[in-house]
Image (tube, coloured by chain):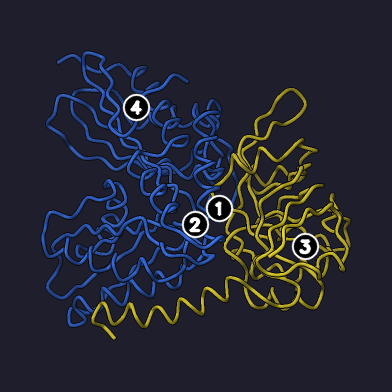
């Protein structure tokens, strides 16, 4: 089978990064617009107005909408033969940092030294999935620290049941308060092991707003938690208001009979994600964004 | 709720005249400082070394901007606020030692910082988190950079701003905090949420 060229993948990933940091997917922008319309207090209305104006300015000027362009987490579904995908993505991140530009955020965890190119050990981080399709699929999630820092995980006891999950969700949201740039999207993982659970919480953030977990019991818990927590009163940017959440997504995995893991990964209102499919014939299809010239 | 346009530097009197909820625009020099710059500034002050900038002559901005090198200078790309609560443990001493009277950030700061603001005469101004292009548009000129060895986000950037805002007075020098008001309401609403979730 004919492989996909390294250069095409690299150029496409630079484009994907640029799209992700300059424009939000339509579902997120739509939710922000709806919240702006629903808010009635001057304080929360002003915050939502600034958010929408900023989105427009960022799109027009093709500038990163938030200065925190995050650390770069990639989700790759490997289809056809391609080269050293990790090396290609690292090149693209280094180029994107200069060309877009992105803020160099990645530092050594102890020395805090910043190499200035968003590259380091395990950074960018890439999750791989084997695919059987004819295309290579790449998703990038530029994840800012304000929301990421408010993430939590707990190994509950099985006897605490759904009640334990609900208590955990409420206390995590109260503890995060104004810090993660609300309105936020909550990604929750339930089940698995500690590492699997947090990974599920992150993956839950990639789902489009309005979607639900295919398991009816999990979907019902998503709706229940969204309904109860959206009206908690934190409001846009923590200055009070009707809406605190963009959505509440849960992903689940079976777990050990003695375990009851639950994790929350928080996403700020700038819920950035971008996905592309690259085909062996060179065709490139963006799933989350309309392609515009840069 | 008043709308005010302030020129930097501000006097203690100007700051004490601000009330939580007021909308403020500031013109003058903003100095960015996050975790690393706070730590280094305090270290230098304790060692008796002079800081490269005077935080009392402008406003302290919790911000790590994206900057682009252009010739000898820098062009600002995006410059929204960062989470202020990360500096909670450093800010009280920072205010007392540097004389910073206006702190711009997002999300608010702790009660301890609020008490220092009240005693000293300082206020906290909230800008919309993530609104980085909007913020950059209000910066007329990048006056320079210090401590770039800390990396682009953690360096001290000198930003000359025109009518930087809209900023909401989140914590005033009288000890009132909008964030604490919201937190109190949130605790009350939490009881309602518990009932809805059947965990009351």
- Alpha-carbon span between mark 2 and mark 1: 6 Å
Q: Secondary structure at mark 1?
A: loop
Residue occupied by mark 2 = A181
Residue B35 located left or right of residue A171: right
Rendered colour, chain B: yellow
Q: Earlier in the sequence, mark 4 or mark 2?
A: 2
Mark 4 vs mark 3: tell me if same chain: no
Do the residues under discs 4 and 2 have CB atoms within 8 angstroms?
no
Residue B129 is marked as 1
Residue occupied by mark 4 = A290
Neighbours of disc 3 within 10 Å: few (<14), some (14-19), many (20+): few
**Dot 1 falls on which chain?**
B
Q: Name the residue rendered at 18%, 14% in the picture.
A: A2
Q: Is residue A192 above or below residue A112?
A: below
Do the residues under discs 2 and 1 have CB atoms within 8 angstroms?
yes
Q: Position of residue B181 (x, y in %)?
A: 56, 76
Neighbours of disc 4 within 10 Å: few (<14), some (14-19), many (20+): few
Chain drawn blue in the picture? A
Q: Position of residue A156 (x, y in %)?
A: 26, 76
Residue occupied by mark 3 = B43
- Alpha-carbon span between mark 4 and mark 2: 26 Å
Q: Secondary structure at mark 2?
A: loop
Residue B19 is marked as none
**Dot 4 falls on which chain?**
A
Do the residues under discs 4 and 3 have CB atoms within 8 angstroms?
no
Quadrant in the rendering for residue A193: bottom left
Q: Position of residue A53 (x, y in %)?
A: 54, 41
């Amino acid at each position: 089978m004919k492989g996909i060229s390294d250069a095409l993948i690299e150029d496409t990933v630079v484009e994907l990064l640029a799209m992700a940091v300059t424009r939000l997917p339509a579902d997120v922008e739509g939710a922000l617009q709806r919240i702006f319309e629903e808010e009635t207090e001057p304080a929360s209305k002003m915050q939502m107005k600034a958010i929408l104006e900023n989105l427009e300015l960022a799109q027009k000027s093709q500038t990163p909408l938030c200065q925190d362009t995050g650390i770069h987490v990639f989700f790759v579904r490997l289809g056809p033969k391609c080269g050293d995908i990790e090396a290609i993505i690292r090149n693209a991140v280094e180029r994107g940092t200069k060309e877009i530009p992105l803020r160099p955020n990645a530092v050594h965890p102890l020395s805090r030294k910043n190499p200035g190119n968003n590259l380091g050990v395990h950074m960018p981080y890439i999750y791989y999935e084997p695919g059987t399709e004819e295309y290579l699929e790449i998703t990038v999630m530029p994840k800012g620290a304000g929301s990421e820092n408010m993430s939590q995980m707990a190994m509950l006891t099985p006897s605490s049941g759904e009640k334990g999950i609900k208590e955990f969700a409420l206390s995590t949201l109260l503890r995060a308060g104004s810090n993660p740039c609300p309105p936020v999207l909550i990604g929750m993982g339930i089940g698995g092991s500690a590492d699997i659970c947090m990974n599920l919480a992150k993956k839950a953030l990639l789902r489009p707003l309005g979607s639900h977990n295919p398991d009816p019991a999990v979907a019902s818990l998503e709706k229940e938690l969204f309904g109860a927590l959206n009206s908690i009163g934190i409001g846009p940017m923590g200055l009070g208001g009707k809406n605190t959440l963009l959505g509440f997504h849960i992903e689940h995995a079976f777990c050990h009979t003695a375990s009851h893991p639950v994790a929350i990964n928080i996403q700020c209102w700038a819920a950035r994600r971008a996905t592309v499919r690259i085909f062996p014939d060179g065709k490139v299809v963006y799933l989350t964004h309309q392609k515009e010239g840069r | 709720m008043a709308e005010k346009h302030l020129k930097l530097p501000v006097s203690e009197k100007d700051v004490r005249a601000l009330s939580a909820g007021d909308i403020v625009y500031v013109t003058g020099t903003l100095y960015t400082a996050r975790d690393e710059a706070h730590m280094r500034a305090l270290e230098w002050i304790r060692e008796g070394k002079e800081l490269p900038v005077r935080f009392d002559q402008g406003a302290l901005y919790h911000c790590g901007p994206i900057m682009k090198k252009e010739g000898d200078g820098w062009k600002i790309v995006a410059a929204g606020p960062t989470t202020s609560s990360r500096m909670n443990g450093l800010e009280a001493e920072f205010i007392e030692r540097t004389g910073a009277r206006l702190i711009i950030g997002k999300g608010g700061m702790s009660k301890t910082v609020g008490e220092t603001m009240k005693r000293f005469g300082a206020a906290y101004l909230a800008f919309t988190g993530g609104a980085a292009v909007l913020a950059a548009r209000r910066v007329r000129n990048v006056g320079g950079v210090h401590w770039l060895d800390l990396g682009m986000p953690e360096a001290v950037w000198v930003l000359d701003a025109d009518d930087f805002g809209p900023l909401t007075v989140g914590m005033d020098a009288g000890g009132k905090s909008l964030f604490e008001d919201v937190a109190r309401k949130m605790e009350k609403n939490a009881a309602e949420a518990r009932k809805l979730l059947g965990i009351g």
